[in-house]
């Protein structure tokens, strides 16, 4: 028997050879064009195997290896040839080599009847399906099944596109197992179909899969599946939010939402902004409205055990002593990442946040959610005009990307939800935004309402009025027929951190809202108040505890600069681009009063 050190070196050498042989076999089975990728995968597997040996563990990576028994010759591990691929490599190494699958990579390496390695068909996403002689695999969920005397048509959707792909299965060209599987196909079941992508003989699609085999991956009982092949109301689909992404509408919303999110990040990265992740748990009320969700570990089920607040003399006061809570003070879910974003803007220059925010507003409208995502850029050495310029450029960019990359989905929305959708999006992407002062906007509204006040739900409009949705939409859709910035709002209806306008004695603030056709307000922003004394005075007027914002005020104490920013309600952007009316259909699992399901 070899000494331990010699035996360990021999083990490493034999494992390395086995991995190398497996990689070569995998590469040769795909030909010269695929050899490089398979060889690298095999070599990587060998590296993992040797790594496990170095740590004293058994070889259990991509090439399996069995050490010889005590007293046996080293060649016993691999057969008479020492490294004979006809035995150990065939029985252990090749059948355990696996390559990671994607839409562009080869599938797992399998062992053929003769013992040689054969890669399974490459998986193709239906959105990328093109005519080819290559044998490929399509995996997804069955939408429809039509059986005829000599063949079957199976529509498979993998979520990558609206249309999916039609799989044609001639009964005389598929194996016996496939014929059995066809009889068990139902709407909703998941399948793996193999064949060639060919030009379609029908007129509804350009290509189809001429399938030679099909296997059911997961069955779907038709008697209990809640998504029968018929149109369902969006209200009903919200009750099965875990399954509604399988419908055309919600799948299209999800794809558009993903594209919009990616293009937002791309825009800000290209413009030199840094992505900052601000906290979700906060002690500060950014908006000063008090509509926040409390975060606590106190046992609220046992009211008697709650620590009571006390005055300086030890007398109990109404309310709970949150100094005894987890964070040592009252804590809430954030309504905005803006205040945290400002801290980094005053160090990095230009930053943005993109994350979930929360508001405990008891609203059941189609425009509000309790949990929603906000895009919030902050720019140092910037004013309100800078914020409007950036917001306009950002929206033109992301809507332009959606028009280019989501054409199939937007065509669907234009057909079933908003016939003028594409025209409206094209106009936003290409036409300059209108800019009008709040005072002028009020004047235009008063003139219009005076013609027939009975047509308006809120006909009373004057300086100081917080514009309602009907006012916002009239300005964008009728008055200007364009996206429009309304700026210089009354101080009384805006947040404490917005900079007072010097020219009108502080009656208005440097704030703006962007109104768009079909939605109303989409963006809200301002130049931030950078003057310490002015900001402190405004906080006192609103009865905000200055001590809670000591860190925010430090930004004004130490190297204060003019800075500005805005917030974009992401779900509102999704509803605008998709042409859908209810914001609850713009997010995967909507949260609103009375609903926190899933």
Image (spheres, grey):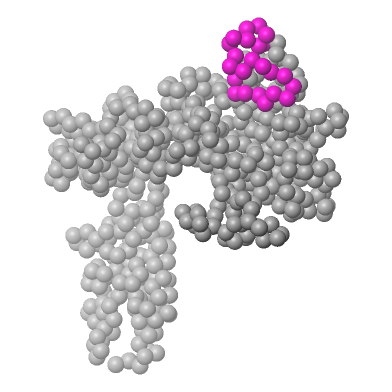
Q: Position of residue 298 (x, y in %)?
A: 52, 57
Indicate the quadrant where residue 320 lies.
bottom right
Q: Which residues are magenta?
A: 448-470
Residue at 76%, 43% in the rendered image: 539
Which residue is more in the foreground, 528 or 155? 528
Which residue is more in the foreground, 347 or 78? 347
**Left or right side of 546 for 477:** left
Residue at 40%, 75% in the rendered image: 52
User: Above or below — where is 418 with respect to 220?
Assistant: above
Report whether residue 401 is seen. Answer: no
Which residue is more in the foreground, 577 or 233? 233
Outermost residue toward the top in this view: 451
In the rendered view of the protein, which quadrant contains the N terminus? bottom left
Report whether residue 264 is seen. Answer: yes
Is residue 416 a member of the stretch shown in magenta? Answer: no
Q: Which secondary structure class fits the magenta region best?
A: loop
Residue at 32%, 35% in the rendered image: 165
Q: Position of residue 122 (x, y in %)?
A: 34, 49
User: Above or below — where is 84 with respect to 121?
Assistant: below
Indicate the quadrant where residue 134 lies.
top left
User: Above or below — where is 343 with respect to 592?
Assistant: below
Q: Position of residue 350 (x, y in %)?
A: 71, 46
Q: Position of residue 598 (x, y in %)?
A: 40, 44
Q: How many numbered callouts?
A: 0
Residue at 67%, 41% in the rendered image: 288
């Amino acid at each position: 028997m070899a000494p331990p050190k010699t035996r360990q070196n021999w083990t490493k050498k034999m494992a390395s050879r086995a991995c190398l042989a497996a990689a070569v076999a995998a590469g040769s089975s795909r030909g010269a064009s695929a050899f490089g990728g398979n060889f690298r995968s095999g070599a990587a597997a060998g590296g993992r195997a040797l790594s496990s040996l170095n740590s004293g563990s058994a070889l259990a990576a991509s090439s399996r290896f069995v050490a010889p028994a005590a007293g046996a010759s080293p060649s016993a591990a691999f057969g008479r040839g020492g490294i004979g691929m006809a035995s150990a490599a065939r029985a252990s190494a090749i059948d355990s080599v696996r390559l990671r699958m994607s839409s562009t990579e080869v599938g797992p390496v399998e062992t053929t009847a003769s013992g040689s390695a054969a890669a399974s068909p490459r998986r193709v996403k239906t959105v990328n399906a093109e005519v080819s002689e290559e044998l490929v695999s399509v995996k997804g969920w069955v939408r429809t099944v039509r059986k005829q005397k000599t063949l079957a048509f199976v529509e498979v959707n993998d979520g990558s596109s609206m249309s999916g792909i039609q799989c044609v299965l001639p009964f005389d060209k598929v194996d016996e197992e496939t014929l059995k599987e066809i009889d068990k196909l139902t709407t909703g079941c998941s399948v793996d179909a193999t064949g060639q992508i060919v030009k379609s003989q029908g007129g509804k699609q350009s290509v189809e899969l001429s399938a030679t085999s099909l296997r059911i991956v997961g069955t779907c009982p038709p008697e209990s599946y809640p998504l029968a092949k018929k149109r369902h109301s969006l209200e009903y689909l919200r009750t099965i939010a875990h399954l509604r992404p399988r419908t055309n509408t919600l799948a299209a919303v999800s794809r558009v939402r993903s594209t919009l999110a990616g293009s937002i990040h791309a825009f800000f990265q290209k413009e030199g902004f840094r992505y900052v992740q601000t906290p979700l748990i906060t002690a500060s009320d950014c908006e000063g409205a008090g509509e926040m969700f409390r975060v606590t570990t106190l046992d609220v089920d046992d009211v008697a055990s709650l620590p009571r607040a006390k005055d300086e003399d030890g007398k109990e006061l109404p309310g709970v002593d949150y100094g005894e809570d987890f964070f040592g003070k009252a804590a809430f879910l954030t309504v905005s990442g803006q205040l945290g974003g400002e801290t980094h803007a005053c160090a990095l220059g230009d930053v943005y946040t993109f994350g979930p925010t929360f508001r405990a507003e008891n609203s059941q409208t189609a425009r509000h959610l309790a949990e929603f995502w906000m895009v919030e850029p902050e720019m140092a050495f910037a004013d309100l005009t800078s914020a409007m310029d950036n917001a306009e450029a950002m929206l033109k960019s992301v809507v332009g990307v959606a028009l280019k990359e989501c054409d199939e989905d937007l065509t669907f929305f234009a057909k079933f939800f908003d016939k003028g959708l594409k025209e409206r999006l094209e106009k936003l992407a290409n036409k300059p935004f209108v800019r009008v002062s709040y005072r002028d906007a009020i004047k235009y509204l008063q003139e219009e309402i005076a013609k027939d006040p009975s047509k308006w739900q809120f006909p009373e409009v004057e300086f100081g009025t917080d514009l309602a949705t009907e006012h916002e939409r009239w300005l964008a859709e009728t008055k200007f027929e364009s996206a429009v910035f309304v700026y210089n709002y009354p101080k009384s209806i805006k947040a404490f951190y917005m900079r007072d306008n010097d020219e009108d004695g502080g009656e208005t603030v440097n704030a703006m809202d962007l109104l768009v056709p079909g939605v109303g307000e989409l963006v809200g922003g301002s130049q931030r108040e950078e003057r310490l004394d002015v900001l402190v005075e405004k906080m006192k007027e609103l009865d905000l505890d200055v001590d809670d914002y000591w860190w925010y005020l430090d930004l004004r104490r130490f190297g204060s600069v003019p800075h500005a920013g805005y917030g974009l309600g992401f779900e509102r952007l999704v509803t605008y681009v998709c042409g859908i009316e209810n914001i609850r259909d713009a997010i995967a699992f909507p949260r609103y009063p009375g609903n926190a399901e899933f």
